[in-house]
Image (tube, helix red, strand yellow):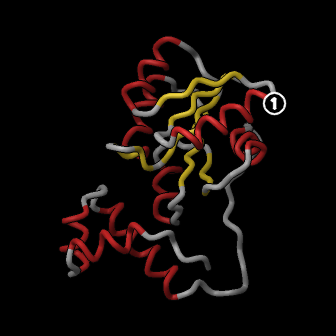
């Protein structure tokens, strides 16, 4: 498979690229949306691994542009800040699957396969209050298209408090 890897974390993407190459795949690494769009003009790819949070842009905002240039491209959204709201937004925007970091090269290839189906894991244990708060913040942030100030006003919360809460890793269930 020819894979386009879009991630601004140079160390992570280099390790992932080597792991995928060892499994026989060809990879092209880019760090932002404009580089990704140029790469899609030059080459046809079978799959794409897209980081949700790039340095100065959102992977969610980049998704429609990628699919406009390559409608058959299978895009896996990969993030260190997974939430139900962003997972739903990614799938609705055209991603074939969504995974939380850290994910192995084998998990990534399985998620990119045409037979992979993204289904939530159901547990009998309810989510913790911290995780519920994280999910709610992500849902409201998605409704305001990533605008921190508008989200903070909507939640009647100080902007810096919201930024601190968003900067933390999500609390596990």
Q: Residue furthest right?
A: 23
Examine the rendered structure and indicate whether residue 157 appears above or below residue 41: below
Q: Residue furthest top?
A: 42
Q: Secondary structure at mark 1?
A: loop
Coordinates of residue 109 in the picture (x, y in percent): 74, 39
Q: State the quadrant of the N terminus.
A: top right
Image quadrant of residue 2? top right
Coordinates of residue 136 in the picture (x, y in percent): 41, 75
Examine the rendered structure and indicate whether residue 168 appears above or below residue 157: above
Examine the rendered structure and indicate whether residue 49 appears above or below residue 87: above
Q: Is residue 143 left or right of residue 80?
A: left
Q: State the quadrant of the C terminus.
A: bottom right
> What's the residue at 61%, 55% (across, down)?
101
> What's the residue at 20%, 65% (across, down)?
150
Q: How many marks?
A: 1
Examine the rendered structure and indicate whether residue 24 appears above or below residue 114: above
Coordinates of residue 117 in the picture (x, y in percent): 71, 50
Q: Is residue 126 left or right of residue 154?
A: right
Residue beneath disc 1: 23
> What's the residue at 74%, 38% (across, down)?
113
Coordinates of residue 96 in the picture (x, y in percent): 61, 43
Q: Nearer the viewer, residue 9 or 109?
A: 9
Q: Is residue 11 left or right of residue 114?
A: left
Image quadrant of residue 95? top right
> What's the residue at 40%, 38% (across, down)?
62
Crowding at dot 1, Cα within 10 Å, few <14 / some 14-19 / many 20+, comes out as few
């Amino acid at each position: 498979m020819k894979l386009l890897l879009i991630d601004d974390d140079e160390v992570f993407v280099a390790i992932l690229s080597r792991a995928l190459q060892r499994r026989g795949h060809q990879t092209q690494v880019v760090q932002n949306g404009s580089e990704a769009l140029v790469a899609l003009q030059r080459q046809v790819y079978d799959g794409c691994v897209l980081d949700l949070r790039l340095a100065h842009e959102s992977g969610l905002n980049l998704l429609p542009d990628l699919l406009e240039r390559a409608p058959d491209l299978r895009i896996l959204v990969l993030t260190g800040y997974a939430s139900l709201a962003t997972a739903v937004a990614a799938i609705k925007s055209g991603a074939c699957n969504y995974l939380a970091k850290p994910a192995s090269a084998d998990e990534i290839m399985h998620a990119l396969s045409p037979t992979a189906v993204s289904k939530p894991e159901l547990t009998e244990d309810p989510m913790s209050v911290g995780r519920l708060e994280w999910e709610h913040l992500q849902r409201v942030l998605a409704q305001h298209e990533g605008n921190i100030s508008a989200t903070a006003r909507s939640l009647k919360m100080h902007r810096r408090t919201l930024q601190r809460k968003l900067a933390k890793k999500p609390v596990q269930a």
